[in-house]
Image (spheres, rainbow, N blue to C red):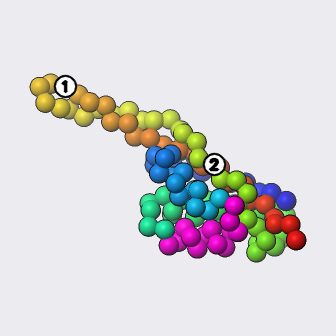
């Protein structure tokens, strides 16, 4: 059985999120949460929260029949979300654009075959 969770409009660059997401792709859930707990990147906190949400979705969807210890991160993908554009004043009456990027993260958990 598979369970999914989505994290949308995260105010963080997709490039920064995808480097941390690559650390936990294919790992068991418990190992993935431990990796994220000790990763000193800002992207680790929202990804850990997302995986915990997917575990809760799995237990709720199966009405407690799924064994949480057998779950692993089947897929985790980071996509680009809309970019907020802001302008900063510069010298001689000019302005430069500041891009505030955001991302969507999708995770799928599945049970490992015995």
Q: Which mark is residue 16?
A: none
The range drawn in magenta is 26-38
Query: Quick check: can you spot residue 14?
Result: yes
Please tell me which residue lies in front, 86 or 28. 28
Disc nearest the viewer among 2 and 1:
2
Residue tagged 1: 94
Q: Residues within 10 Å of mark 1 (few under 14, many from 20)?
A: few
Nearest to N terminus: mark 2 or mark 1? 2
Q: Quadrant location of residue 109? A: bottom right
Look at the image and say whether residue 76 sits in the magenta stretch: no
Q: What is the C-alpha distance between the residues marked 2 and 1?
A: 38 Å
In this view, 86 is above or below 15:
above
Which percent across, then down, holds residue 54?
69, 60
Residue at position x 69%, y 61% from top?
26
Look at the image and say whether residue 28 sits in the magenta stretch: yes
In the picture, measured across the screen, residue 4 lies left or right of residue 100, that is right
Residue at position x 44%, y 62% from top?
41
Residue at position x 51%, y 63% from top?
45
Q: Which mark is residue 77?
A: 2
In this view, 113 is above or below 85:
below
Which percent across, then down, holds residue 9?
53, 44
Q: Secondary structure at mark 1?
A: loop
Query: Quick check: can you spot residue 56?
Result: no
Q: Secondary structure at mark 2?
A: strand
């Amino acid at each position: 059985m598979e369970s999914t969770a989505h994290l949308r409009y995260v105010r963080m660059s997709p490039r920064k999120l995808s480097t941390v997401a690559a650390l936990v792709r294919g790992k068991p859930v418990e190992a993935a949460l431990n990796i994220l707990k000790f990763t000193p990147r800002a992207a680790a906190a929202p990804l850990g929260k997302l995986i915990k949400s997917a575990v809760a979705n799995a237990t709720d969807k199966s009405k407690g029949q799924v064994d949480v210890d057998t779950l692993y991160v089947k897929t985790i993908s980071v996509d680009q979300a809309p970019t907020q554009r802001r302008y900063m004043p510069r010298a001689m009456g000019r302005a430069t654009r500041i891009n505030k990027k955001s991302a969507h993260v999708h995770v799928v958990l599945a049970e490992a075959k015995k």
